Amino acid sequence: PVGLGGAFRRNRPARSGDYWRNVLTFEWRPDVALEFLRPGVGTKLVYERGDGELRYQRAEGRFTVRVNRGRLALGTRLDVGAVSPDAPPQQFFELGANQNLPGYDYKQFAGDQAAVLRGQIYRGFGILGAPVRITQRVWLPPIAPGLALNVQAGYVRATTAASRSTILQLGSTETGHVRSSAALTLRFFGQAVGLGIARPLDYPAGWRWVLELGQRL
């Protein structure tokens, strides 16, 4: 089958089976994020467990800081996580073009342990801030354009032979060292849509066009 711009990607390997899924979540000030307006520090901790035909344990931590200065917003976010090395492939951490390293290929890296640090400086233009009326009952959100500079650094690894076998099945690799990239994008609709350029920072490479749906931080 062929999609826009070329053939669809092959489905990623996954393991099927029945299982019980339990999740324990702790959040402190979850509205401290770049997609919201509240400044300060926020935290989210998640423990997930699967029992049955599919068995795994997974833990994640998220730490976010945001500062507002008029139309300028500065934010940084650290994500760390670990999953059982023999977990199903769909539970592994993946990094790449649409997974927090826009300068790299799609899901280029994978592993059972991961850490990603991101920072963003965003400047709103202060124009087109009113909702757009299409019909009497249909409105679009404000276009609200702005410019964002993002920098990302990520590291992911496989800790055992079993986890290394899994990432080979996924067609990915370990990062080997900390990988970093940068992106400069025009953002619209409350930063929900971004169009711009990105490139890796840890080795010589050219810029590539990126289209982002959803906030990067």
Image (cartoon, rainbow, N blue to C red):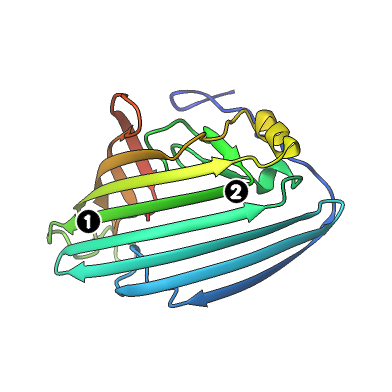
Vertical comparison of 146 with 110: above or below: below
Check the picture and name the quadrant holding the N terminus: top right
Label 1 sits on what residue type? Tyr
> Is 7 left or right of 78, judged from the image as shown?
right
**Which mark sits nearer the N-terminus, 2 or 1?**
2
Please provide percent x and percent y for residue 158.
64, 40
Can you tell which mark lies on residue 90? none
Q: Residue at x 77, y 59 (%)?
A: 50
Q: Residue at x 42, y 32 (%)?
A: 104
Residue 166: quarter of image: top right
> Is 24 left or right of 207, judged from the image as shown?
right
Label 2 sits on what residue type? Gln
Please provide percent x and percent y for residue 132.
24, 60
- Tell which tag, 2 or 1, sits nearer the viewer: 2
- Please, which residue is most extreme toward the right here? 53
- Spatial CA span between label 2 and label 1: 30 Å
- Mark 2 lies on a secondary structure that is strand
Vertical comparison of 184 with 34: above or below: above
Please provide percent x and percent y for residue 210.
34, 36
Q: Residue at x 43, y 24 (%)?
A: 5
The residue at which mark 1 appears reads as 122
Tell me, yes or no, whether the two marked residues, 2 and 1, touch with CB atoms within 8 Å. no
The residue at which mark 2 appears reads as 113
